[in-house]
Image (cartoon, rainbow, N blue to C red):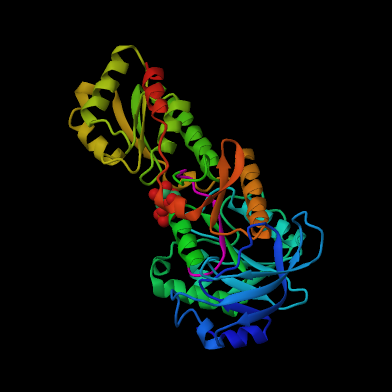
């Protein structure tokens, strides 16, 4: 753990776990800090992270951007009350240094989000640094300063220019500590994490360790609490639909049934929506998985009703995924009426160019991430709720599960007639 005195010498005083967060947003701490009480050693959180602390800090605050007339005020904060991380800056202009990274499975629109974070951050007068390969890059402590031109011409591209990774080491306390030290070494103030479920769990842990983090909801699975649609799901859905439309053409020519497996890990959103919008005869999702027997009956019934082809959309997370289902059906070929084929869309769904919805969503959420930081907020996920950009505490994001709207399931059954 670095020495607080050293930090002060560099103009930044870090007190892990404690934070002064004035209720009114937009208060920037810009004046000198008087420590009233303990010695420097007492301030090192690595030594005493959770001890009750009687220390009070008298901070001179420069009130900005909160509608209160410019002026100085002296307020006393008690770290026990104002929990979190205390970050005090020495008098004088200090530029905010923020980092942005993409983590987990890539999603179409991540580039648009990076672009929005970089450009809105620069607009606020901050330095923006890109971290390559997600949390793995953060632990390695390599960052690269990004300018407006560095994110030019990327909004229309899928994937992520920063690269992404799954990082098992970051799930350990040791791994996260590595990242904390790297962030301190790089003198980064905050991190914006663009990613899905696993990534935002990492964000939450990092934020708890005293690094202010804002998450941006991005995953094709759409399984993240805190955002109705996540960045990438719309494009992935369109790719699945294009594939289903094509499969229908060849299925009709041969009077075949296709089992189409789509991604979604343990969430059936993509499969259900692809089933409804693709006009499927049956949908198999982990949240409400029909027995293969029932699917076989549905196919037979479709055949008997005179359908010339049939599509079953199967979510990869279903107990009986497409392969398991096909094995079951192969043994009962005569029952179905249709000849059967299997198509697994897999990563094809992730690699598309973001469509308009994802570009706009990613742009709005990226911009919101820096807005949250500007207001001194962190430990939140920015997403779209009820059509509006909103921030949800990461504590809720990691502890709550997004539920699937069961009405869609019923609708899928009705429309398959
Ligand atoms: O989380 C997005 C996702 O595409 C899931 O739908 C899928 O289960 C998983 O990632 C695949 O992960 P990987 O790209 O690491 O194989």
Horizontal and vertical percent for residue 249?
A: 45, 25
- Horizontal and vertical percent for residue 377? 61, 58
| Residue at the far left in the pictured view | 331
Q: In this view, does 108 lie above or below 11?
A: above
The x, y position of residue 192, in whole percent, is: 59, 60
Q: Closest to the observer: 164 or 380?
A: 380
Which residue is found at the position 61% from the left and 39% from the top? 388
**Residue 127 quadrant:** bottom right
Q: Which residue is drawn at 67% across and 84% down?
A: 10
Image position, residue 228 (x, y; %) = 52, 39
By secondary structure, the bulk of the magenta-drawn segment is best described as: loop
Viewer-nearest residue: 35 or 190: 35
Q: In which quarter of the image is residue 373?
A: bottom right
Q: Is residue 328 visible?
A: yes
Q: Look at the image and say whether residue 210 sits in the magenta stretch.
A: yes
Q: Is residue 236 above or below residue 277?
A: below
Q: Against 315, is 119 above or below?
A: below
Residue 41 lies left or right of residue 412; in this view the side is right
Quadrant housing residue 413: top left
> Front-most of 57 and 11?
57
Query: Magenta region: which residues?
Result: 209-222
Q: Nearer the viewer, residue 341 or 368?
A: 368
Q: In the picture provided, is 384 more to the left or to the right than 200?
A: right
The residue that appears at 72% across and 57% down in the rendered structure is: 119
**Residue 356 appears left or right of 125:** left
Give the residue displayed 58% in from the left and 72% down from the top.
Answer: 86
What residue occupies the far right of the structure in this picture? 70
Position of 106 with respect to 257 (left or right) is right
* The magenta stretch spans residue 244: no
**Residue 278 seen in this snapshot:** no
Above or below residue 332? Residue 183 is: below
């Amino acid at each position: 753990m670095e020495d607080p005195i050293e930090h002060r010498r560099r103009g930044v005083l870090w007190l892990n776990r404690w934070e002064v967060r004035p209720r009114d947003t937009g208060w920037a701490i810009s004046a000198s800090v008087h420590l009233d009480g303990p010695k420097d050693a007492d301030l090192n959180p690595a030594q005493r992270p959770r001890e009750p602390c009687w220390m009070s800090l008298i901070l001179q605050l420069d009130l900005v951007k909160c509608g209160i007339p410019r002026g100085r005020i002296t307020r006393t904060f008690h770290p026990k009350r104002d929990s979190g991380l205390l970050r005090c800056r020495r008098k004088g202009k200090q530029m905010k240094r923020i980092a942005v990274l993409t983590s987990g499975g890539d999603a179409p629109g991540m580039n648009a989000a990076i672009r929005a974070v970089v450009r809105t951050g620069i607009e606020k007068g901050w330095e923006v640094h890109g971290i390559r390969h997600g949390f793995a890059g953060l632990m390695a402590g390599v960052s690269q300063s990004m300018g407006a031109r560095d994110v030019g011409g990327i909004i229309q591209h899928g994937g992520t220019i920063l690269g992404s990774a799954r990082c098992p080491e970051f799930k350990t306390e040791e791994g996260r500590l590595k990242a904390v030290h790297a962030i301190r070494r790089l003198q980064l103030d905050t991190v914006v994490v663009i990613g899905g479920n696993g990534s935002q769990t990492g964000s939450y842990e990092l934020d708890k360790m005293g690094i202010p983090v804002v998450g941006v909801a991005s995953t094709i699975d759409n399984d993240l609490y805190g955002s109705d649609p996540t960045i990438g799901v719309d494009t992935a859905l369109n790719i699945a639909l294009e594939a289903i439309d094509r499969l229908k053409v060849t299925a009709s020519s041969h009077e075949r049934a296709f089992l189409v497996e789509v991604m979604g890990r343990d969430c059936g959103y993509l499969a259900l929506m692809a089933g409804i919008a693709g006009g499927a005869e049956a949908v198999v999702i982990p949240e409400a998985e029909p027995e293969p027997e029932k699917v076989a009956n549905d196919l037979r019934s479709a055949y008997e009703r005179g359908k010339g082809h049939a599509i079953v959309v199967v979510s990869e997370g279903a107990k009986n995924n497409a392969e398991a289902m096909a094995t079951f059906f192969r043994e009962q070929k005569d029952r179905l009426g249709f000849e059967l084929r299997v198509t697994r869309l897999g990563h094809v769904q992730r690699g598309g160019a973001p469509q308009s919805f994802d570009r706009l969503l990613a742009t709005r959420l990226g911009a919101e991430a820096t807005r949250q930081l500007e207001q001194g907020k962190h430990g939140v996920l920015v997403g779209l709720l009820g059509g509006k950009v909103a921030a949800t505490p990461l504590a809720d994001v990691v502890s709550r599960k997004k539920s699937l709207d069961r009405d869609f399931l019923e609708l899928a059954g009705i429309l398959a007639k």
